[in-house]
Amino acid sequence: KNQVEQSPQSLIILEGKNCTLQCNYTVSPFSNLRWYKQDTGRGPVSLTIMTFSENTKSNGRYTATLDADTKQSSLHITASQLSDSASYICVVSARRNRDDKIIFGKGTRLHILP
Amino acid sequence: NAGVTQTPKFQVLKTGQSMTLQCAQDMNHEYMSWYRQDPGMGLRLIHYSVGAGITDQGEVPNGYNVSRSTTEDFPLRLLSAAPSQTSVYFCASSYRDRTRDTQYFGPGTRLTVL
């Protein structure tokens, strides 16, 4: 069964600290993995996308890693800011010929305290 | 570009009422989707369209209808609202391929069915 599991469910850190969010997936055949940021009351916004051959992708203070062998990804946030308070959603795509699937994780809720 | 727009932002319905959630995009994207987001669950696909005149069901299509008469618009119709349809609804669009191209999400419509 195609699944995307994220941990932790929620996280509270102080402004300026670093943090790492985890994503484990059992999706086949793997096409790509994205991390989205969803601010409260808004739609998700894509942060990074990684394909099978990529193991690191950065977007400013956000760095995503992918281990396709262990089917794990992480999102590292450096020097957190109050604006980083949001839900972060791991999304894995599967594709075989013309049949595609997108599986969304439930998200990690991140709270940054001043 | 306005991106993906959705109206209304909030709506309260009584059981049995019908309504249409509007979605429009000005990016000339071919692929459009409707998702629902419920607490503790990942986004779930309701219906999608690969181009004007073509629609198909996602994983939770019951109780919803869609049509795609133009590239820009993709309305979602609730035929007879039920409390189980209380949710936040997101419309998304992507250039051509929803797994390989970035999906752009609208701001969402928060629907409550009493």
Image: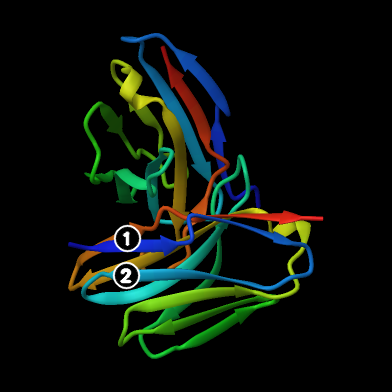
Label ID, residue A25: 2
Q: Is residue B98 visible?
A: no
- Location of the N terminus of chain A by quadrant is bottom left
* Whether marks 2 and 1 lie on the same chain: yes
Q: Amino acid at mark 2?
A: Tyr
Location of residue A30 (image quadrant): bottom left
Q: Nearer the viewer, residue B70 or B41?
A: B41
Crowding near pointer 1: few (<14 within 10 Å), some, many (20+)?
Answer: many
Q: Is residue B94 left or right of residue A14?
A: left
The residue beneath circle 1 is: A102
Q: Residue A64 placed where, x, y %?
A: 53, 78
Crowding near pointer 2: few (<14 within 10 Å), some, many (20+)?
Answer: many
- Classify A10 as above or below A49: above
Q: Residue A99 placed where, x, y %?
A: 19, 64
What kind of element bears circle 2? strand
Q: Is residue A84 left or right of residue A38?
A: right
Q: Residue B111 placed where, x, y %?
A: 47, 25
- Classify B62 as above or below B59: above
Q: Is residue B30 visible?
A: yes
